[in-house]
Amino acid sequence: MCKAWDDHKKAGIREGEERGRKGILISLCRSGEISVEVAAREMNISTEKFKEYLV
């Protein structure tokens, strides 16, 4: 594979992993398993920003 394709593939994989991680944290927060604060900290964002995902 050429470098551009390899870089593009790696970026896609990272994006997919991040979406999956965000989905899991949202699910755990909605079910009450973890707090909004813990989920936000895990995503390295503010609690206010994380609350936007819960709507």
Image (tube, rainbow, N blue to C red):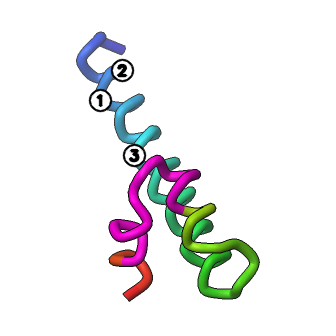
Residue 3 picture location, percent across and down: 29, 11
Rounded to the nearest whole Å, what is the CA distance between mark 2 and mark 3? Answer: 14 Å
Element on which disc 3 rests: helix
Q: Main secondary structure of the magenta part?
A: helix
* Highlighted range, magenta: 40-51
| Neighbour tally class for label 2: few under 14, some 14-19, many 20 plus, Cα within 10 Å | few
| Quarter of the picture holding the C terminus | bottom left
Question: Mark 3 sits on what residue?
Answer: 15
Image location of residue 39, percent across then percent down? 58, 63
Q: Which mark is residue 24?
A: none
State the residue at coordinates (45%, 40%). Answer: 13
Q: Specify the quadrant of the image occupied by residue 24.
A: bottom right
Asked if marks 2 and 1 touch (Cβ < 8 Å), the reply is: yes
State the SS at label 1.
helix
Q: Which residue is mark 2?
A: 6
User: Which residue is the site of mark 1?
Assistant: 8
Inspect the magenta stretch and tell me whether residue 10 lies in it: no
**Considering the image in quadrants, where does the N terminus appear?**
top left
Type of amino acid at the residue the image marks with label 1: His
Q: CA distance from mark 3 to mark 1?
A: 11 Å
Sequence-wise first label, 2 or 3: 2
Residue at 70% of width from left, 72% of height from top?
34
- In this image, 55 relative to 30: left or right? left
